[in-house]
């Protein structure tokens, strides 16, 4: 079978698809921000795209965080003032929620801070 | 692509001969030393490409099924993910190759069809791998697609040559 | 008897602990090895490591340490070990299940039988050389054109490891449920 025009066309289209796939995959995803939780010298990382409820043990008791619909918040805490719960949900790069009595700090971080950081200032 | 006007009366026999050839070529592929395991040339796909020229559409899908089940019986992987990967990749690439050969009837050679087959089979397996192994598997897609592109072209050229030279195929056309 | 094989597969899939799953996968490999099967270790190690790396690329859970730009997290590491072990374990479990117990019904079953006959025919006769690949294959096809398949059996011996596999799987499955709360 001789090589036909369609072969060359498919060759180029397939190559283009592979290049497109590779570039989009290897490019740092700006949507993939994640929550960084620091407590008691330990660091935890949770992507915001996955729903999660987790309880952490701090110096004065338990603090429960919840990730839902791409936002993270503190839903329960053993602290007295409950300021952390009132701080609400966060999802933007650079935002933070903390439960100071329990020494828990949540910050939103991302792969490409550059552009978004400028916007948030 | 030249289509046969009349199909052989006993096309099940042709399916099992080509199926046997698939298993034989997998064996050869398994024996030849490779720098990195899991990288396959894919010569076992040559009979599938041949079948697109000589078998009716329904029988091509039968051959793909036979190749996947038979291959898993030989390697003993019938109850593992590998069978699932291989079957879904082969079926989807088989359907895509059949569609493209209908669409571009005489205007495409085995190189184009092989490239479509390799791309769709690899994309299916990457999709499955991300579902089973986790989102990080998409990075593995990059080398897989690039290697598949090279081997797909190679297999296409080889099958083109086979269809040109083969006496078996020429007897078939009579 | 063969139902125990399927039970083993299901129990193995549902073991949640990464380390127990890894241990069980290792036991399956050893059973294969003990049954004098040819085992290649390096591909398995590469498979396990690539699955672990795939999972580490997606950080989740407690950060253990930093490796350049990559954050190595505990949950990702464990999930990588779990999934890699599942993949390898199922592969070797499957190898231990005797093929004679599987009957594929209907037309497909018949086609597979014939396929194995022709596969045997292909492996006999002249060797296929790299330089003359196309003509070698073509000659084999021509030689086969006039043969008709005769009854042939799939060449795989019945390996009777069902009981040992089932019992170890069951023990580790119970351990996974953690009845003693350790």
Image: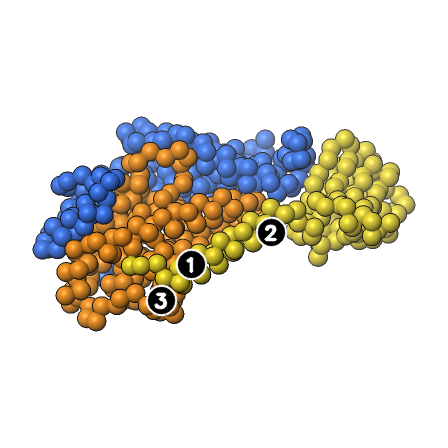
Q: Position of residue B54 (x, y in %)?
A: 24, 63
Seen in the picture, residue C132 relative to C109 is either above or below; the reply is above
Chain B tint in image: orange
Q: Residues within 10 Å of mark 2 (few under 14, many from 20)?
A: few
Seen in the picture, residue C121 relative to A7 is either above or below; the reply is above
Query: Label for residue B81?
Result: none
> Mark 3 — residue?
B107
What whole-number distance in Å separates the C-alpha atoms at marks 1 and 2? 24 Å
Query: Label for residue A8?
Result: 1
Q: Position of residue B100 (x, y in %)?
A: 39, 65
Subunit bearing disc 3: B
Chain C tint in image: blue
Label 1 or label 2, whichever lies nearer to me, is: 1
> Mark 2 — residue?
A24
Q: What residue is shown at x 28% (from left), y 29% (from top)?
A: C36
What whole-number distance in Å separates the C-alpha atoms at marks 3 and 1? 11 Å
Q: Position of residue A98 (x, y in %)?
A: 84, 43
Tell me the quadrant of the picture where the N terminus of chain A can be found: bottom left
Chain A tint in image: yellow
The quadrant where residue B41 appears: top left
Question: Is residue B42 visible to the viewer in this orientation of the structure?
Answer: yes
């Amino acid at each position: 079978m001789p090589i036909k025009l369609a072969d060359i066309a498919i060759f180029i289209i397939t190559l283009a698809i592979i290049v497109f796939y590779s570039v989009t995959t290897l490019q740092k995803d700006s949507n993939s921000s994640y929550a960084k939780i620091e407590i008691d010298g330990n660091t935890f990382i949770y992507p915001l795209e996955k729903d999660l409820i987790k309880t952490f043990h701090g110096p004065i008791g338990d603090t429960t965080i919840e990730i839902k619909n791409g936002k993270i918040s503190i839903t329960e805490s053993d602290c007295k003032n409950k300021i952390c719960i009132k701080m609400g949900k966060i999802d933007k790069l650079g935002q933070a929620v903390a439960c100071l009595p329990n020494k828990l700090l949540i910050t939103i971080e991302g792969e490409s801070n550059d552009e978004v950081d400028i916007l948030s200032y | 692509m030249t289509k046969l006007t009349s199909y052989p009366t006993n096309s099940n026999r042709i399916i099992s001969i080509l199926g046997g050839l698939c298993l034989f070529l997998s064996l050869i592929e398994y024996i030849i030393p490779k720098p990195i395991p899991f990288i396959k040339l894919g010569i076992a796909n040559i009979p599938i490409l041949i079948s697109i020229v000589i078998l009716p559409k329904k029988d091509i899908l039968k051959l793909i099924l036979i190749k996947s089940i038979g291959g898993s019986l030989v390697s003993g992987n019938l109850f593992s993910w590998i069978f699932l990967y291989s079957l879904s990749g082969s079926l989807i690439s088989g359907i895509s190759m059949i569609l493209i050969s209908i669409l571009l009837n005489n205007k495409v050679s085995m190189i184009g069809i092989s490239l479509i087959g390799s791309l769709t089979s690899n994309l299916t397996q990457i999709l499955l791998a991300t579902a089973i192994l986790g989102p990080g598997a998409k990075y593995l897609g990059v080398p897989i697609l690039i290697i598949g592109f090279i081997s797909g072209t190679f297999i296409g050229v080889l099958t083109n040559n086979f269809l040109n030279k083969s006496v078996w195929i020429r007897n078939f056309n009579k | 008897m063969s139902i125990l094989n399927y039970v083993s597969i299901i129990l193995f899939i549902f073991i949640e602990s990464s380390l127990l799953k890894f241990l069980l996968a290792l036991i399956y490999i050893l059973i294969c090895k003990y049954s004098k099967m040819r085992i290649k270790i390096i591909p398995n190690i590469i498979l396990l490591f690539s699955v672990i790396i795939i999972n580490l690329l997606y950080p989740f859970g407690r950060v253990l340490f930093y490796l350049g730009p990559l954050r190595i997290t505990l949950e990702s590491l464990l999930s990588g070990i779990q999934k890699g072990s599942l993949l390898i374990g199922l592969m070797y479990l499957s190898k231990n299940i005797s093929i004679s117990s599987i009957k594929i019904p209907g037309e497909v079953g018949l086609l597979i039988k014939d396929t194995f006959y022709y596969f045997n025919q292909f492996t006999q006769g002249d060797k296929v050389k790299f330089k003359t690949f196309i003509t070698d294959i073509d000659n084999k096809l021509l030689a086969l054109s006039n043969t008709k398949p005769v009854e042939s059996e799939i060449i795989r011996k019945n390996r009777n490891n069902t009981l040992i596999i089932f019992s170890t799987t069951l023990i580790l499955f119970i351990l996974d449920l953690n009845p003693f709360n350790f």
